[in-house]
Image: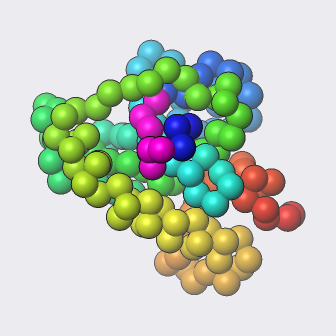
Amino acid sequence: MDTKKIYELHYLSSEFYKKYSSSEYPEIEHKAQRPYIVLLIKVDNNTFALPLRTNIKHSSCYKFQYSSRPTDSITGIDFTKAVIVNEESYIGEAAEIDNKEYVELNDRIAFIVSKFRTYIRGYYTYVSGKANEYQAKRYKFTTLKYFHNELGISK
């Protein structure tokens, strides 16, 4: 990832999907015909890829307020399906998004990163067994469970 920019937009590579197959990693989003655009950000020592989705129905995300896309659903950045892509070969080609979403992303990136950091901290609480029932629900379908090594979580 370019060190001058706080984020980038890409697709994940075929190498990533070979390593993280849907049969072995069912919570990771796989759409071969229409791959997800991901927001790449660095948090601590990891590069995270957060998918942009068009139908988000939960609160563990950032929901775009503005979009030019013709959709009645809520578009946003889904924290629950974040993956770690520290291997350069896992990052595919650059991607572009709707112009209104792009402007909003640029304006709100610091807030989005902060909100995602809070989500990660909550995951550490959840894994340690200190989360209440409501907090635990947020992590039921998270993809972070596949990246304990990278997150420094021992089994």
* Quadrant in which residue 153 is drawn: bottom right
Query: Do we see residue 13 in this rendering?
Result: yes
Q: Which residues are magenta?
A: 4-10
**If the image is split into quadrants, where does the N terminus sit?**
top right
Query: Do we see residue 23 in this rendering?
Result: no
Residue at the extreme right of the image, as rendered: 155
Up-down: is 98 above or below 139? above
Measuring from the top left, give residue 117's x and y in whole percent.
52, 66
* Membership of 7 in magenta stretch: yes
Residue at image point 44% right, 38% down: 8
Residue at image point 13% right, 35% down: 68
| Left or right: 75 in relation to 1 | left
Measuring from the top left, give residue 22's x and y in whole percent.
65, 30
* Quadrant in which residue 129 is drawn: bottom right
Up-down: is 62 above or below 19? below
**Viewer-proximal residue among 23 and 81:** 81
**Viewer-proximal residue among 17 and 39:** 39
Residue at the extreme front of the image, as rendered: 4
Measuring from the top left, give residue 104's x and y in whole percent.
22, 49
Measuring from the top left, give residue 21's x and y in whole percent.
69, 28
**Viewer-proximal residue among 141 and 108:** 108
Figure disc tally: 0
